[in-house]
Image (cartoon, rainbow, N blue to C red):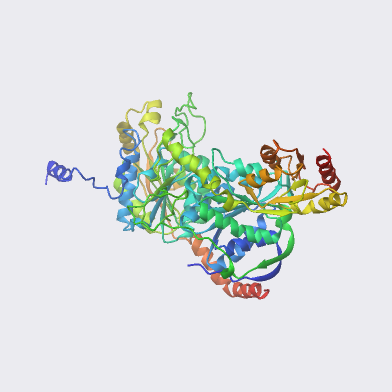
């Protein structure tokens, strides 16, 4: 088949979107800007859920606040649009209270690493069994382009009109240092690799973190003269290099450097719940003795 | 999935521990918390007891995470508790609003200490009364219960869970450091003998279910995550599908109901204790530990020939407006001692002030009222 034939086949049934079982079609069109990377990222996320072979009824998405915070409203899954920065602890409660659920958090860089930064490092430390996808567009989009903890030095924002003077976070470095079981970085250009990564993260246990570098045409590109969303996406593609062996703590992002992508961490270590169970098993006799003593007091 | 709590009998038990036992008896199997004096013992007891009952204990990194985790656990269908004190509530308030907006059952115990700020961590006050009512931004109804003893720490924690499940909202237990740290006799009945209200789950099929459809009721039926309903819920103003709709019209449908589900059921929620109010000329309104420390003062005033009664709101919020109005029409006045600089008295004055004098007896916390001050206030009201 040549390219046109493939395209023809794809648009034969134009009344039905190929992903319509996984999105809330009654909420389309979405609110995201044309040229934003979020559509591609969310589609790749849902492809990943599909690839992981999960029962959709047992998959939950939790989001915080911001452009990416709106993801929860569009996926046709049990979905929670929570408060700014608190998606991870909300998801932690959901997962621990029903361990049969696959719990994903999709939120932005400001939500997860500024206001929610403390929750991120502690969830990674605990190795709670959740998948966290951070859509990093280097800026606060929803509120109109303010500096984020990821904004590169010297990049312009509405609160840094003379260029950002704060050192940004390297998200994959933080995740690895805090103890995440799985750490990966992709761009919105790497949709297939991203969906594979989501599938791996959804199937494995422990705290998984995936950073997705994504274009914001409306504020980041415009304020920094990066052209359209498509041009910025192409730039991310050209700047990226895949290196699974890279040390995640040594690959920060700035305005020009290489965007090192890959799966940097993929380790098995006991999850929060496994450690809880281990502790109970170890002390089970003591607990039973104490318990009966407790009840005997009546 | 979970084991029932078998603990019952007569105990010499601390208030905080009785609170934890009340939660377990009510079927609570999740605690998300953060250490804070004087509430820590609630979490410590749960850390010990929950694993035995197959429940989940998690000590979070702060109170914000604690309440967020509790809301998440509740959406997984598990009764969930968090315990803290005033500073913790200050941190939780944004997500308490989320719990109100998403209509999420859970119980929040505030073992009050004296504020503002760090205040007196190891001692007591009743100064979070208005914080409980208006702590989070926006308009919503509130239920708060004030125990006066370890026994009531047990009993009212169960009541709080029942209300939270019935009205689908976070409910406060407004204890204080005295009640929390005091050790007294606590009777724990067998769990089968307790009245426990269980969450009302939808019987509709996925596809027919809308998370905030009322079907003629004030409180929508629940669906938990993982049951195939694939619902959406949000802290944004939403329609009955749970979808965000940013219009004035939707705000009108969404927000007033959060207050009406309380205001239309005040009689079901309000619990009062009355002593000698039938023939009283002066009524002391006191709640929590203060309702016990004023008793000698009331006896002293009665010895002086003043007919004094005691009205104790067990339910602090919603305000027992009906009963206080009835009493205001036949007594000479009210005296309101409370361990804050005059919070609950504002509501008493709003309701009763147009009929009779209402006298506040403030106290900043860290101690109790002097009997003489209360007697003097009663005399002033009695003799005009």
Q: Quadrant of residue A139?
A: top left
Q: Position of residue A226 (x, y in %)?
A: 35, 28
Nearer to us in this view, B173 or A284: B173
Image point (66%, 49%), residue name: B85
Q: Is residue A125 visible?
A: no
- Of residues A204 and B35, the one nearer the viewer is B35
Image position of A53 with respect to A248: above or below: below
Residue B361 x/y as whole percent: 78, 42
* Residue A145 in view of the camera: yes
Towards the viewer: B171 or B300: B300
Horizontal arrangement in the rendering, residue B163 relative to residue B177 (left or right): left
Q: Nearer the viewer, residue A272 or B2?
A: B2
Q: Report the residue that reaches farthest toward the top.
A: A162
- Provide residue A22's location: percent of width, then percent of height: 30, 49
Q: Quadrant of the C terminus of chain B?
A: top right
Instruction: Give the number of marks.
Output: 0
- The residue at the far right in this view is B304
């Amino acid at each position: 088949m040549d390219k046109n034939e493939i395209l023809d086949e794809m648009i034969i049934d134009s009344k039905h979107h190929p992903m319509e079982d996984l999105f809330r079609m009654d909420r389309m069109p979405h609110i995201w800007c044309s040229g934003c990377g979020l559509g591609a990222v969310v589609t790749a996320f849902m492809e990943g859920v599909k690839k992981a072979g999960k029962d959709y009824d047992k998959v939950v998405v939790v989001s915080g606040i911001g452009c990416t915070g709106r993801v929860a409203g569009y996926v046709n899954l049990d979905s929670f649009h929570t408060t700014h920065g608190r998606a991870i602890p909300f998801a932690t409660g959901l997962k621990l209270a029903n361990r049969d659920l696959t719990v994903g958090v999709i939120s932005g860089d400001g939500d997860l690493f500024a206001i929610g930064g403390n929750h991120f490092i502690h969830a990674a430390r605990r190795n709670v069994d959740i998948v966290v996808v951070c859509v990093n567009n280097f800026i606060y989009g929803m509120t109109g382009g303010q500096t984020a903890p990821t904004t590169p030095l010297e990049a312009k924002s509405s609160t840094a009109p003379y260029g950002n003077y704060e050192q940004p976070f390297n998200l994959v470095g933080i995740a690895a240092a805090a103890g995440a079981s799985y750490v990966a970085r992709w761009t919105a250009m790497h949709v297939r690799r991203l969906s594979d990564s989501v599938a791996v993260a959804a199937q494995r246990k422990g705290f998984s973190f995936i950073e997705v570098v994504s274009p914001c045409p409306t504020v980041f590109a415009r304020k920094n003269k990066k052209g359209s969303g498509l041009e910025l996406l192409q730039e991310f593609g050209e700047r990226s290099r895949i290196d699974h062996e890279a040390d995640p703590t040594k690959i920060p992002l700035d305005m020009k450097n290489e965007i090192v992508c890959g799966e940097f961490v993929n380790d098995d270590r006991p999850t929060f719940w496994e450690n809880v169970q281990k502790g109970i098993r170890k002390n089970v006799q003591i607990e039973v003795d104490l318990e009966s003593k407790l009840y005997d007091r009546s | 999935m979970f084991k029932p709590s078998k603990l019952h009998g007569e105990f010499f038990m601390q208030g905080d521990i009785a609170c934890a036992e009340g939660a377990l008896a009510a079927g609570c199997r999740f605690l998300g918390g953060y250490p804070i004096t004087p509430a820590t013992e609630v979490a410590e007891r749960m850390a010990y007891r929950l694993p035995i009952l197959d429940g989940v204990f998690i000590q979070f990194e702060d109170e914000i995470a604690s309440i967020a985790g509790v809301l998440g656990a509740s959406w997984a269908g598990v009764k969930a508790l968090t315990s803290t004190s005033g500073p913790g509530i200050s941190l939780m308030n944004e997500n308490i609003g989320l719990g109100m907006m998403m209509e999420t059952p859970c119980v929040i115990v505030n073992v009050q200490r004296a504020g503002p700020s760090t205040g007196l961590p190891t001692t007591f006050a009743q100064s979070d009364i208005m914080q409980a009512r208006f702590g989070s931004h926006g308009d919503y109804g509130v239920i708060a219960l004030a125990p006066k003893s370890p026994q009531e720490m047990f009993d009212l924690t169960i009541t709080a869970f029942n209300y939270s499940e019935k009205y689908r909202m976070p409910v406060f237990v407004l204890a204080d450091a005295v009640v929390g740290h005091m050790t007294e006799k606590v009777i724990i009945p067998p769990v089968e003998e307790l009245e426990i209200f269980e969450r009302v789950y939808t019987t509709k099929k996925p596809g027919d279910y809308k998370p905030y459809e009322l079907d003629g009721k004030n409180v929508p039926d629940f669906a938990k995550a993982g049951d195939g309903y694939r619902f959406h819920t949000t802290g944004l103003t939403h329609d009955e599908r749970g979808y965000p709709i940013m219009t004035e019209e939707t705000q009108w449908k969404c927000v007033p109901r959060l207050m009406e589900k309380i205001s239309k059921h005040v009689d079901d929620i309000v619990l009062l204790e009355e002593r000698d109010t039938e023939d009283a000329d002066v009524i002391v309104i006191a709640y929590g530990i203060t309702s016990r420390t004023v008793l000698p003062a009331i006896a002293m005033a009665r010895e002086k020939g003043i007919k004094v009664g005691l009205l104790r709101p067990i339910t602090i919020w919603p305000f027992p407006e009906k009963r206080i109005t009835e009493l205001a029409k036949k007594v000479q006045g009210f005296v309101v001692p409370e361990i804050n600089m005059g919070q609950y008295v504002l509501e008493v004055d709003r309701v009763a002030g147009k009929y009779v004098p209402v006298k506040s007896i403030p106290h900043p916390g860290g101690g109790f009222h002097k009997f003489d001050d209360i007697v003097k206030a009663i005399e002033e009201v009695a003799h005009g």
